Amino acid sequence: MPVEQPDPEPEVPPGLVPLLWLLELFPGLASPKVLILSILALPVAAGVLQLALLLIGFGAIVTGIFIAGFAMVIYWTAVAWLLYGNICMPAEAMAEFDSTKWMVFLLAAFAPMSLFFLWLGLTGS
């Protein structure tokens, strides 16, 4: 009985390797529904954050902080959808993350916030 050889892996052009790595890391980029909803969540999160900053400026600090936390949850949900590749509750997506996806999630979650606070500190507004 002859032994069947497995099919060889198809050769990937060198220019597509980074794109394939990005799609493997963010499978939501390949799903139009996930991509569109994640992109639409970004202005919603920015609007909620603007409302929080407005309330903090008026002196409602505790309320503003809670609303800013809600803005971060909206943003984190969009990032979790992109990393998971499906629309679901963020906890369900995060339960499936491996160590690489957790590091990308933490970087994507906290780097923009750090840059925002750096901008606030440098501009004084």
Image: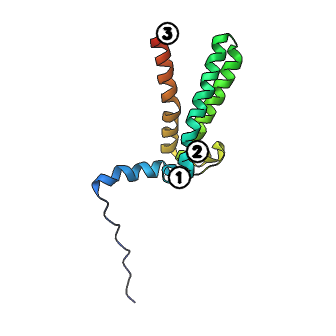
Disc number lying in front (3 or 2): 2
Three-letter amino acid code of the residue under disc 1? Pro
Question: Colour mode?
Answer: rainbow
Alpha carbon of mark 1 to alpha carbon of mark 2: how far?
8 Å
Q: Residue at x 28, y 54 (%)?
A: 14
Disc 3 crowd rating (10 Å Cα; few below 14, some 14-19, many 20+) is few
Q: Residue at x 48, y 44 (%)?
A: 100
Q: Which residue is mark 1?
A: 32
Three-letter amino acid code of the residue under disc 3? Gly
The spot of residue 103 in percent (x, y) is 49, 38
Alpha carbon of mark 3 to alpha carbon of mark 2: how far?
33 Å
Q: Which residue is mark 3?
A: 124
Q: Earlier in the sequence, mark 1 or mark 2?
A: 1
In-image side of 108 versus 73 (left or right): left
The spot of residue 65 in percent (x, y) is 66, 20
Q: Nearer the viewer, residue 44 or 81?
A: 44
Q: Quadrant of residue 38?
A: top right
Three-letter amino acid code of the residue under disc 2? Leu
Question: Mark on residue 47?
Answer: none
Q: Which residue is mark 2?
A: 37
Q: Earlier in the sequence, mark 3 or mark 1?
A: 1
Q: Nearer the viewer, residue 46 or 4?
A: 46
In-image side of 115 versus 51 (left or right): left
Q: Nearer the viewer, residue 45 or 28?
A: 45
Residue at disc 1, secondary structure: helix
Q: How many marks?
A: 3
Residue at disc 2, secondary structure: helix
The spot of residue 1 in percent (x, y) is 40, 90
Alpha carbon of mark 3 to alpha carbon of mark 1: how far?
39 Å
Q: Residue at x 70, y 16 (%)?
A: 62
